[in-house]
Amino acid sequence: MSSIAAYYNGKTVLITGATGFMGKVLMEKLLRSSPDVEAVYILVRPKAGQSMQERVANMVKSKVFDRVREDCPNFQEKIKPINAELTQPNLAISAKDSQELLSQVNVVFHCAATVRFDEPLKHALLLNVMGTQQLLLLARQMQKLEAFIHISTAYANCNRRNIDEVIYPPPVETKKLCDLVEWLDESIIQEITPKLIGDWPNTYTYTKALAEYLVQQEKEHFNVAIIRPSIVGASWHEPFPGWIDNFNGASGMIIAAGKGILQTVKVNNDAVADLIPVDVVINLILAAGWYTAVHRPKTMMVYNCTTGGINPFCWGEIGYHVISTFKRNPLEQAFRIPRAQTTSNHLINQYWITVSHKAPAMLYDFYLRLTGRKPRMMKIFNRLHKSMMLLEYFTCQSWEWSSENMNMLMTQLSPEDRRLFNFDVRQLHWSEYIENYCIGAKKYLLNEDMSGIPAAKQHLRKLRNIQYAFNTTLLVIIWRIFIARSQMARNIWYFVVSLCYKFLSYFRASSTLRH
Ligand SMILES: CCCCCCCCCCCCCCCC(=O)SCCNC(=O)CCNC(=O)[C@H](O)C(C)(C)COP(=O)(O)OP(=O)(O)OC[C@H]1O[C@@H](n2cnc3c(N)ncnc32)[C@H](O)[C@@H]1OP(=O)(O)O
Ligand SMILES: NC(=O)C1=CN([C@@H]2O[C@H](COP(=O)(O)OP(=O)(O)OC[C@H]3O[C@@H](n4cnc5c(N)ncnc54)[C@H](OP(=O)(O)O)[C@@H]3O)[C@@H](O)[C@H]2O)C=CC1
């Protein structure tokens, strides 16, 4: 029997961010591997006109739960949603719910965060830092708490090149900063944000670094551990290969490439693309929860959950495998044939953006206008360029993360646990993984049926013909303009045409003689 699965059976678990990408995969794996878990409390806020109950009812219908639904059809009875808003005082949890959590919870997994790179500093602080602080305060009063697992990011310290499994001192005193932004005007905060975040590329990584420090402060009060995943991608095996349900990280770019929208991207081809499958991260999280609660390590453990140092793969290789997968399994209604120029040179990238993004977008919008429709392509490209600009910090450089704690944890697992909660990325076969990632994005994210592939291939052939016809017409037009202006070009043109004519006459004469 698996020690990890056995540990969670009979335990009460609290998950924040359970409606998110990682939260759902975590909940699914927990309920499937430990069907006798006592209860899984999840903190959920009402959103987009849906109440908490409606959101949870919709969530449990999601495909991600298909496997656990098969194994334990009543799995949703274990899920106990609690109305909460992490940016509000006391997390906006009612006194009754709060009492229930304080008396029941054994393990906390804190996944909730804003992961947007362009989040205004005030909101990022409210959620990622103050929300974490309030959850820690709640956890301190939990009578049966055995482990608190905080999900950070491997990029929390991306202002350093070599990142060890330690907490680095924060750039400012967190409390003072939070007090400051509380009374400062939003526009002033916006203005001083670049100064405040210093050499962090965005408010997300900056606030995640501050939150790590807060978590460390609690190590005297209960058992805590921090997991730092790098760029979390589609699943490797569980619940299904290629499972993905959002456009964050690399997924949006991969889809844009498959749709033929993204034709050029600024990446350092030789820089390590530190992607990590979501199921690897979840297995490590569950194993770390077990280890923290059962072995109670004396020092607070930080687990860098990365692939680069163990099984490296570069951005150039990712680009190649993405394009070749989408050529074999095209997405429906692609804008252009998938192709990706990858360069770290700013000028070359700008050139390709003009030629292969902006020019086709303008032409297509012109065509839409002519046919009485609303132009939309330029708007899509502007959004794509904004995303590319925010992501290029991560695709143009490499980091080195130590992964001793992840390796140590692996040695603590029984063979059965290593099989059930596998986070050994040495076994990851990248080309196979990227292929499943692209197909998963097609199936689960875009809801495209695999039976539509022949029609999608036919559409690509049509696009190829349009492109050939367009390129030939363009060449002829340019040549005509050139000929009209230069005597030398005219002479060359007449020389080439007469050569072709002579060759054709010779060919016709020799074939008549043969007959
Ligand atoms: C071949 C080459 C491959 C190379 C490939 C390079 C990959 C290079 C990855 C680096 C990755 C670093 C990762 C750091 C490591 C962490 O720690 S990652 C943490 C994860 N965080 C992120 O990835 C967040 C990044 N994203 C953002 O901050 C925001 O999305 C951006 C980039 C600022 C864009 O914001 P926005 O323009 O307001 O758009 P956004 O609100 O995101 O989306 C609007 C809608 O469009 C949808 N949408 C977004 N993208 C798409 C899309 N592509 N298609 C269709 N719909 C889409 C959204 O789902 C959303 O729908 P609704 O929710 O409104 O229904
Ligand atoms: N995805 C990635 O590539 C990486 C993620 N991480 C970390 O992993 C964790 C999970 O990320 P991921 O699942 O991808 O993120 P998602 O954006 O998919 O999920 C975020 C979760 O946080 C919840 N949340 C956001 N704001 C609030 C709020 N004010 N009150 C209550 N809940 C809130 C969301 O709830 P709602 O549905 O209501 O919005 C959602 O459940 C985060 O801590 C992130 O920093 C680390 C490295 C990489």
Image: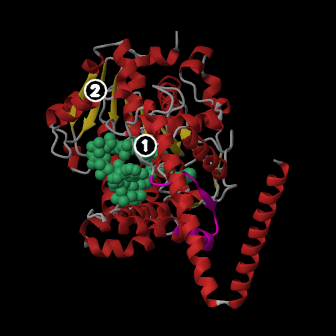
Q: Which residues are magenta?
A: 335-353
Residue located at (80% from left, 59% from top): 509
Q: On screen, 437 above or below 205?
A: above
Pick the front one: 63 or 335:
335
Judged left or right of residue 118, residue 306 is: right
Task: For residue 40, say whether it is visible.
Answer: yes
Q: Nearer the viewer, mark 1 or mark 2?
A: 1
Furthest toward the top, the residue is 1
Of pointers 1 and 2, the one earlier in the residue sequence: 2
Q: Is residue 344 magenta?
A: yes
**Side of 291 where 319 appears, left or right:** right
Picture coordinates of residue 441, whole percent (x, y) = 45, 39
Q: Are marks 1 and 2 in contact (CB under 8 Å)?
A: no
Q: Provide the residue designation for mark 1.
A: 332
Question: Which residue is pictured at 38% across the width and 18% down the height?
Answer: 68
Q: Crowdedness of circle 1 by 10 Å Cα count: few (<14), some, many (20+)? A: many
Residue toward you, 307 or 233: 233
The CA span between labels 1 and 2 is: 26 Å
Please, what secondary structure does the residue beneath circle 1 have?
loop
Q: Residue at x 33, y 35 (%)?
A: 18
In the picture of the structure, the residue carrying the numbered disc 2 is: 61
